[in-house]
Image: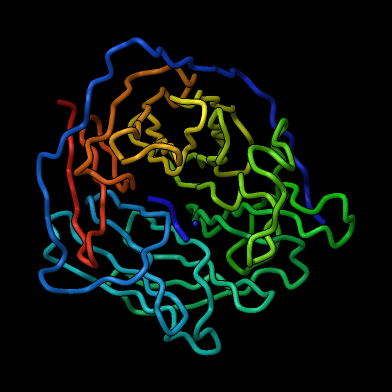
Amino acid sequence: MRAKRCCTVIALTVLGTTNIAWGQNQTVPRLVATDVHEVPQGQRWGMLALPVKCDPDGNLYLHERQARGGSLLVRVSADGTQITKFDFDSIENLKNAWLSDFSVVEDGEIFGLLKSGGAYTIAQFSKDGTFSGKENLSPDLPANITQLVALHGGTFFVSGTDMGKEDPKLSGAPFNALYDQRGGLLKQVRFRSDSAKQGKKATADPAGNSNLAITLGNAVAGDDGNIYVLRLSSPALVYVVSPSGQPQRRLRVASPTSSAEPISLAVSRGRVAIVFDDPNAKDASNGRVRVVDSQNGKLVSDYRLSKELGEVLGCFVENTFTFWRADSGLLRIVQASPQ
């Protein structure tokens, strides 16, 4: 399922790049559903947008775009019985702002990246859904930001595309940076070989983003404290960055088919799970989950997706995967393991 989705400069030194080839004739085990929860009984869900994220307790966080405009974030427990809402529309002067991304920290606090007009705000909610504060990012921000990762110590990593304000030739080029807790720019982070037009044609989306490899990518905090930045490209590229903004390495993971693209990732206990979707495939059973070592990118395991799983990975712990799927307005959480 696809979503309707003055500073110090640091350059990446690629410590080890691994290109994993797909064996067309090898037997690939299938992930099958072991538990399914409907969430909740009788409630109708609107349009859900990527990404889906989870916390250490296995709760899923879903971004529901409201029909009237604006955004609502919903936390659903792993068994589907508990729901907590984080209403970004309730924030003064930010009603109908677009939730570009969000980040969940270990204690359950939520940080949302909101865009209203050309300005960006990071809003904070407590674990119980209570709004607790906001900070505006630097007003001279030269980029469209689409990814946010909240870090220990109150800093934030963001990723997006340059708007070309200072140099039109840079329009669509990658923009990665660290911001402090007051919204001030600390440093810009550059990845070597992170091409400005990588993976997708430079056709701007409605928000003005001209590099869809970045716009439709993903960024998450790993349980090792590092930041994992996924580009929507083939092969999939995952850049690993330390909490201080120091690039560590690049993982290069081949797509399972020539037309497959990475749509989401999750990180757990030294493993990176990437879900690949093939837009030319007839159904979700042609999707793949590829698990690689977070240190060197070596293949750990490959799994085919069963039709009942859907394609959106929320949580990944060892050999247990949690997906969600929407059927006729009903949401189902599906836990799966290798067959």
Tell whether 300 sits left or right of 214: left
x%, y% of residue 145? Answer: 63, 60
Residue located 59% across and 17% down the image: 16
Q: Nearer the viewer, residue 160 or 169?
A: 169
**Up-down relation of residue 109 to residue 150 (above or below):** below
x%, y% of residue 215? Answer: 59, 53
Q: Nearer the viewer, residue 152 or 37?
A: 37
Residue located 77% across and 62% down the image: 142
**Up-down relation of residue 141 to residue 192 (above or below):** below
**Up-down relation of residue 69 to residue 215 (above or below):** below
Number of disc labels? 0
Q: Nearer the viewer, residue 235 or 229?
A: 235
Tell whether 287 sits left or right of 199: left
x%, y% of residue 6? Answer: 82, 57
Tell whether 112 sits left or right of 213: left
Quadrant showing the C terminus: top left
Residue located 31% across and 52% down the image: 54
In the rendered image, which quarter is residue 237 located in?
top right
Residue located 46% across and 61% down the image: 102
Here the colouring is rainbow
x%, y% of residue 64? Answer: 36, 69
Q: Residue furthest bottom?
A: 92
